[in-house]
Image (cartoon, rainbow, N blue to C red):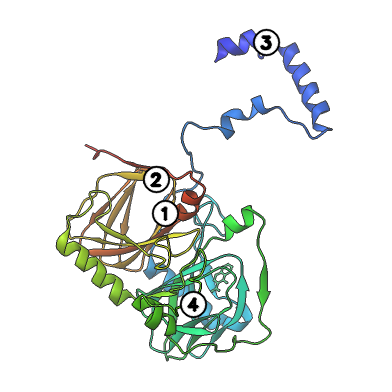
Amino acid sequence: MDGIEDAAGRTNPENQRARKKLYERMRRHNLAPLWEVLHDILRPAPASPCAPALWRYTEMRPYLLEAGNTNSAAEAQRRVLVLENPQLPGQSRITRSLYAGLQIVMPGEIAPAHRHVAAALRLIVEGAPGAYTAVDGERTAMASGDFIITPSWTWHDHGNESDRPVVWLDGLDLHIVNLFEAGFYEQWPEERYPTTRPAGSCLAEIGAGLLPVDDGGGGHTSLLLSYPYARSREALDSLARHQAPDECHGFKMKFLNPLNGGWALPTIATCMQLLPKGFHSVPYRSTAATVFAVVEGSGSTLVGAERLDWQRHDVLVVPSWVPHEHIAATEAVVFSFSDRAAQERLAIYREQRGPRRS
Ligand code: 1HN
């Protein structure tokens, strides 16, 4: 590189002064030299500023409860502790493109109705009979391990009619929407959006693979809003009974939009995986930074040079293109989400299955 620089006269002080002056004059016309920044813009492979990180539920829960007793859900709009990537503080990001947070709704509370372009997913951590989220006027029950979606621009409020706090993990595509400067947000004038359908209708109908005959079938988002854990667990067990585990993922299944066979949400890919006791995966990496949330069991994930030891309800993040492997100490079930769905739509997604490290 030095030789080329010398040939171009870069290291010559007189030349450097001339360049500086050129750049200053150009800047007045909003022009900048690409050759000074090209090495930062074009990299041979993704070099994420994000760090691998682990959030322990035993450490987060006391803060959540304290927040629950400090302000009301109505006052806070959404009472959430944001899981911030340690390398991106103050940005409300767990990865460059995704938001994650733990939300608590105390007994008797309502998180008021609103809607936004950003789509949301919920993984229920501590559910209870009587806890619900309502999407466009239909309530869905929140039990531990359930996966529930809030599609883009749908009215939603959350309530807790049980006698204990309910907690869930939120994931949103906020930073994708904001990158495109396509965000809108509205509050409903009352606490709750009016009821439009009986609780659980969409699960009873679309969950049975049935749709009123003349309905269009929706767009890019799943019309099935709830994927109860009991059924996800059964599906994983069923797969494990007739198939060998994938060497990188164990038994990993994606949450489907039953109307088009694609991902449940158009931007965020969501999966649930079963890792048999003692399973040690072959390293894997992809361009989709991934958030993992432990539903059952314990184990470790080796991410680059780090080892993250996880237990039930912990959350961890693996940055883009960093090889990682999972080791299950007990049988484990792990939920995950990433921006893979958006990357596939943009035709930029890549993955690599690596050889085992010696
Ligand atoms: C939001 O609307 C919810 O509806 C949760 O529960 C977290 C984080 C940022 C922006 C909007 C919710 C959110 C959010």
Q: Nearer the viewer, mark 1 or mark 2?
A: 2
Residue corresponding to mark 2: 286
**Residue at the front extreme of this rendering:** 214
Q: Tell me the SS state at disc 1.
A: strand
| Image marks 1 and 2: residues in contact by CB distance under 8 Å | yes
Residue corresponding to mark 1: 290
Three-letter residue code for mark 4 = Asp
Quadrant of image for the N terminus: top right
Distance in Å between CA atoms under marks 3 and 1: 45 Å
Counting from the top left corner in percent of width and height, residue 127 is at 39, 81
Distance in Å between CA atoms under marks 1 and 4: 38 Å
Three-letter residue code for mark 3 = Gly
Ligand 1 sits in which quadrant? bottom right
Three-letter residue code for mark 1 = Thr
Q: For this view, does 173 lie left or right of residue 326?
A: right
Q: Tell me the SS state at disc 3.
A: loop
Identity of the residue drawn at 26% across and 71% down: 233
Three-letter residue code for mark 2 = Ser
Counting from the top left corner in percent of width and height, residue 287 is at 44, 45
Residue corresponding to mark 3: 9
Q: Tell me the SS state at disc 4.
A: loop
Say above or below: 16 vs 296.
Answer: above
Counting from the top left corner in percent of width and height, residue 100 is at 49, 63
Residue corresponding to mark 4: 214
